[in-house]
């Protein structure tokens, strides 16, 4: 098995991983919680259509929400029990702190529906495979949550499938753990996706600080030879989709475009594992590996937990809080977001729960003026000029902010880490994106109002033209149908007025 040629993406940083704390122990299958919580609203604010009612008993694997919408794959019950309530509850979304949730009380039996696998996926059509993946509720498990059935849709000719196991952000180790213990299943899932896409090449990337995963993959690849394993440098953010594509293929995803535009599809290794379970075993997405890390918890480790498990329950099963806890984060320390409560549930996209201890993520420092050192531009993997964006944004020069491509920022926070003035650049760029989106919405609203005004004016003018035309036609019609007697009467009246002009 040959190792593919590697390229280099611009910028990036080598960071301390903090991964050994959570990988020194094998993954633990989490205990079944008393109550599972399922948000009925997506992070984009879309409400999901329920298939069950309060008081109804459901089985493990039974769909709770409809599968009619391809953009919102169904949610399945992760255990058997009774739907106790549907009511507002805290959500782990930065854009929506709370929303309606379904509460499923476990009955402790864990009774399952009968799973039906595809007997031979190679004999199935691509549409059948996509439908199976969709009905199994599979989305991208690397964090973005994009529906896998849509991402593998027939939009472009795909020549390269990339399985992303480059887990570059500190503390997160669930993909590393998955590859150490379930390498064969991941490669089998890669095979399914490879067949579905009809791609020529299939690459699986891990970082060079994952030796145990490398060994496990090499062993599994003896039986599965159509997937090439690539070891890439552990430079943050190698795991970013565009950066990994650059490293493995040398290709650049066009600005505003998608990897499919250049013939590449990138899927997370956990997504491949879920695809194997769905297609080969007939099992929908009910659980996932999640890292619980940080000095704020007594025993950091990876848990195989049911979707919908409250975060507080996961922390409890890792020994509970250590007493040093300072900040609770969903995701990693750089691209994750702060949680205000541990009552929120585990989602399909939740790869890490970081319980940061006091001072573990650094001590807040006072922000000072920019000194134009340029370090931020040196480490930016998107080839942006963060310093210029900072100045343009502060001055409210929004056309310049857009021109300097703030929307291309992947919010990796590399610029924050190297800024000697401790300017929160990434937070500023998020705000700038929001401002540009607000201005664009205002522009579209004004354009819509202008179009409505012009359409109304044109409609009024058209009505006037039609009335004038109708009047003209009426006069012509009267002239045509006038009888000779009427014409003679009119002529007599005209003659009489001419003889006696004073007569009215």
Image: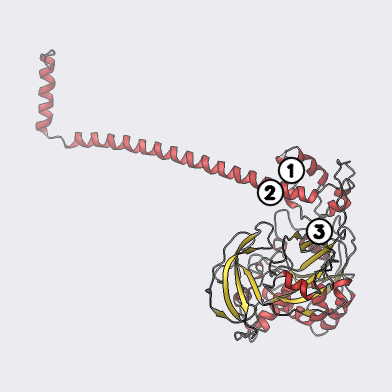
Of labels 3 and 1, earlier in sequence is: 3
**Residue that mark 3 sits on:** 334
Numbered disc 2: secondary structure: helix
Q: Position of residue 1 (x, y in %)?
A: 86, 78
Spatial CA distance of label 2 from label 1 is: 12 Å
Residue 76 visible: no
Numbered disc 3: secondary structure: loop
Numbered disc 1: secondary structure: helix
Q: Quadrant of the C terminus?
A: top left
Above or below: residue 138 compared with residue 412: below
| Mark 3 crowdedness (10 Å alpha carbons): few <14, some 14-19, many ≥20 | some
| Mark 2 crowdedness (10 Å alpha carbons): few <14, some 14-19, many ≥20 | few
Q: Position of residue 114 (x, y in %)?
A: 60, 86
Which quarter of the picture shows residue 445? top right
Which quarter of the picture shows residue 244? bottom right
The disc label shown at residue 434, or none = 2
Spatial CA distance of label 3 from label 1 is: 23 Å
The disc label shown at residue 495, or none = none
Pick the residue in front: 453 or 314: 314
**Residue that mark 1 sits on:** 401
Pick the residue in front: 248 or 425: 425
Q: Position of residue 254 (x, y in %)?
A: 73, 55
Residue 452 visible: yes
**What residue is at 83 percent from the left and 52 percent from the top?**
380
Of labels 3 and 2, earlier in sequence is: 3
């Amino acid at each position: 098995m040959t190792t593919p040629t590697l390229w280099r993406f611009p910028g990036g940083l080598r960071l301390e991983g903090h991964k050994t704390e959570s990988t020194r122990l094998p993954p633990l299958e989490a205990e079944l919680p008393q109550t599972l919580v399922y948000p009925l609203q997506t992070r984009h604010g879309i409400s999901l259509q329920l298939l069950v009612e309060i008081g109804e008993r459901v089985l493990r694997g039974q769909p709770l929400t409809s599968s009619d919408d391809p953009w919102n794959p169904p949610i399945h019950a992760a255990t058997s029990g009774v739907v106790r309530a549907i009511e507002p509850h805290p959500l782990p979304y930065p854009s929506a702190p709370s929303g309606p949730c379904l509460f499923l009380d476990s009955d402790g039996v864990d009774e399952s529906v009968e799973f039906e696998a595809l007997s031979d996926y190679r004999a199935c059509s691509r549409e059948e495979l996509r439908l199976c993946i969709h009905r199994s509720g599979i989305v991208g498990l690397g964090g973005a949550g994009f529906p896998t059935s849509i991402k593998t849709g027939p939009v472009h000719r795909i020549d390269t499938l990339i399985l992303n196991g480059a887990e570059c952000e500190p503390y997160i180790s669930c993909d590393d753990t998955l590859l150490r213990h379930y390498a064969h299943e991941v490669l089998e899932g890669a095979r399914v996706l490879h067949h579905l896409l009809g791609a020529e090449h299939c690459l699986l990337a891990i970082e060079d600080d994952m030796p145990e995963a490398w060994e496990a993959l090499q062993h599994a690849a003896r039986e599965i030879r159509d997937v090439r394993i690539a070891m890439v440098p552990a430079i943050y953010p190698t795991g970013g989709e565009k950066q990994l594509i650059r490293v493995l293929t040398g290709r650049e995803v066009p600005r505003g475009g998608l990897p499919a535009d250049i013939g590449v599809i990138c899927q997370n290794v956990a997504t491949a594992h879920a695809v194997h379970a769905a297609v080969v075993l007939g099992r929908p997405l009910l659980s996932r590996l999640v890292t619980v890390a940080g000095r704020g918890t007594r025993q950091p480790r990876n848990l195989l937990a049911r979707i919908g498990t409250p975060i507080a329950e996961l922390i409890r099963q890792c020994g509970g809080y250590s007493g040093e806890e300072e900040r609770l984060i969903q995701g990693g320390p750089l691209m994750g977001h702060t949680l205000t409560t541990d009552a929120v549930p585990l989602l399909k996209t939740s790869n890490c729960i970081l319980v940061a201890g006091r001072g573990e993520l650094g001590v807040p420092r006072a922000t000072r003026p920019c000194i134009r050192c340029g370090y931020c531009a040196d480490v930016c993997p998107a080839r942006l000029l963060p310093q210029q964006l900072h100045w343009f944004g502060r001055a409210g020069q929004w056309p310049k902010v857009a021109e300097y491509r703030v929307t291309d920022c992947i919010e990796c926070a590399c610029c924050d880490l190297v800024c000697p003035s401790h300017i929160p650049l990434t937070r500023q760029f998020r705000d700038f994106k929001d401002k540009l989106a607000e201005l664009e919405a205002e522009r579209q609203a004004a354009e819509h109002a202008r179009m409505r005004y012009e359409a109304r004016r044109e409609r009024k003018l058209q009505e006037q033209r039609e009335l004038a035309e109708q009047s003209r036609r009426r006069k012509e019609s009267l002239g045509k149908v006038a009888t000779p007697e009427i014409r003679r009467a009119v002529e007599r009246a005209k003659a009489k007025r001419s003889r006696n002009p004073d007569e009215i």
